[in-house]
Image (tube, grey):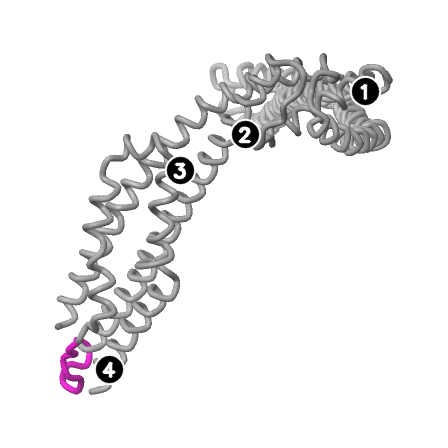
Amino acid sequence: MRGNQVIQYIDEQKGAIEALVAQLDEIQVAFNAQFDEFKGQHDAKLAGLTDQVTARLEAIGPKLRADIDTQLAAENQQIAERRRKLRHEYLPQRQEAADELLGQAQAELAELRALNPQLDEREEGLKRQKANLEASLEALNEEIRQKSRGLGVVLHFAAIHKADGERQRIIGRLEGINDYLLNVRHRWEMENTKAREQQTGYQDRWQLESIAVARLQSELDQLDDETRRQELALQRATRHVLDALKEPAPGADPEIDAGLKAMIDLNIQTDAYHEGLASVGGFIGLLRGIDSGLDAIRKSIVSLQDEQRMHSAYLKTLDYRLPSQVTDFHKQWPALAEQFADEKAIGAHPSEFSANVEPILTGPLSESNIEAMFEAFGESIKNATAVW
């Protein structure tokens, strides 16, 4: 095979892999959508059953009660640690952050207030200079008008020329003062606008920190209450145990026993969804890795072609022979695409998907087979370039 033919072959395989990935993406979307809906049902059942069990601990079986008691000790320890961190770390840190924002805001306002009289004084001084110059200019204009009447232009030419020079000098100074005034006013407007924006930012951040402080304080107040703390620990311990329940735990209350059985079924389904999501994610990641590897080989062959064209007078045209480890490996894409074509139906059965994917990942798409394919591809390139 010539280089162009190998590139075409690689592109075909990459296209087949990408199409398969697109199908698996749809399956992953279906898994996630169904899991979100299922998780709502699972969590609602878990919350209701947790309330039932904590209200009637005497009615549950000894094994379940022992598991809850064991977890209760762990929850009490975690709550104690949370309480300590709230009091000595989280609350002081957030309060300090809020106080710091308030201090920064007040300091910048003070700077703006200090700048205001300075700029005002500068502006008033410029206004006074401007008024004096305008008066001088008006006097010079009047002098020039008086001396320019009749033959005055001839008689007073030197004085008029001198007055006009002074007049131009004053006009130049007035223009400079007007520029200074404009700059002073512009600076004040700019500083004022900047300060307003910064104050708004400080206020928004301070409010967020204050809300965080209030929430943390509310949580600490609850944990400081011994009765509420014990209730929370029991709720969390019971929920933890029920959420992991996989085996029957009969007790003295038929209603609770029925709820426990339903919870076991939901927990098993949860595991199936987790397994399905992990399987489809791992499958997609593996295929993208193969696609990336083929892309690297494609770039190598393109580079060899470019080199051959640049030195065609000295380098022979390369002839590639793809070994069976390569061609046999890539024959599996059409069958896999057909196997996972019905994304909607597959998405409804995550455990079946996981069971179907497992032999693929340990068989045709095993790590050893993938490595053998790429090694064989690399060897074929090496053999082709041996003629150079």
Residue at left offset 48%, top offset 19%: 151
Alpha carbon distance from label 2 to label 1: 100 Å
Where on the picture, by quarter, is residue 48?
Answer: top right
How dense is the environment of label 4, judged by Cα within 10 Å: few (below 14), some, or many (20 and up)?
A: few
Label 3 vs 2, first from the N-terminus = 2
What label sits on residue 230 in the rendered view?
A: 1
> Quarter of the image holding residue 277?
top left
Q: Which residues are magenta?
A: 309-320
Q: Which mark is residue 351?
A: 3
Amino acid on which the number 3 mark rests in the picture: Ser
Q: Is residue 28 left or right of residue 36?
A: left
Q: Please tell me the numbered disc located at residue 161.
A: 2
Q: Amino acid at mark 1?
A: Gln
Which numbered tag is attached to residue 383? 4
Image spot of residue 61 (x, y percent): 69, 24
Mark 2 surroundings: few (<14), some (14-19) or many (≥20) residues within 10 A: few
